[in-house]
Amino acid sequence: MKRTFRCIAAFLFLLYTLFLPGRADSANAPVYHNLRSYTVDDGLSSNHVYGIVQDSVGFIWFGTDNGLCRFDGREFRSYTHTDGDRSSISSNNIRRLMLDSRGQIWLALDNGVDIYTPATDRFRHFDARTADGAFVAGQTTEVIEDRGGGNLDCDRQFGTFPLESRNGTTHGLPPSSQ
């Protein structure tokens, strides 16, 4: 009797482990054998990455708390703020990245928004301002492009500021009343 009970218990245990919930999903999950992580030792400017985008050329861009990094599959190139250089990134503290329909990379920063144009390898800074021209301080948390590729919303700590793109230039619009 004990032997029969043990055989049944062993058989049920075997069935349970073979048909364990979730096991089928994990058995079919892809296995990445060549997965590699990158750190500051490999050239990444910081181990704290807050935004990632891939451009049409294939470069992968990383927004960190110590600048912007471009990865070409072999090495990193870092972009950091340079005092007195208005074409450099205006802050090293990047919170989000957004690739727009023109191939420009928008950087949500702790002091506004920068726009990186790969063709010129330069940054332009955009300050959020109210309808009467007053500067709005605060961290930018997100930049979002509409489906048509013409208008963007810049979400700041204290409100949303729409941006309008015309002929490749961007200017601020008064914040929408909510």
Image: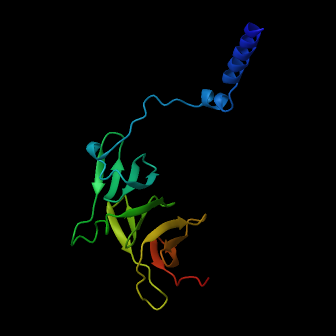
Q: Quadrant of residue 80?
A: bottom left
What is the image's colouring? rainbow
Quarter in which the C terminus is drawn: bottom right
Query: Is the residue 15 above or below the residue 91 in the image?
Result: above
Work out which quarter of the rendered image holds the N terminus and state it.
top right
In the image, what residue occupies the spot 53% across and 70% down?
152
**Residue 18, image x and y in percent?**
67, 21
Q: Residue at coordinates 35% horizontally, 42% vertically from top-left?
A: 38
Q: Is residue 160 left or right of residue 105?
A: right
Q: Which residue is at 69% across, 20% downward?
A: 13
Say if 13 sits above or below 150 in the image: above
Is 10 situated above or below 127?
above
List the single residue furthest toward the bottom: 132
Q: Is residue 52 left or right of residue 10?
A: left
- In the image, taking residue 32 as reference, residue 28 lies left or right, namely right
* Viewer-closest of 12 and 155: 12
Residue 129: x %, y % from top left: 44, 83
Point out residue 94 in the picture as x, y percentages from the top left corner: 38, 62
User: Is residue 177 shown to the viewer in this render?
Assistant: yes
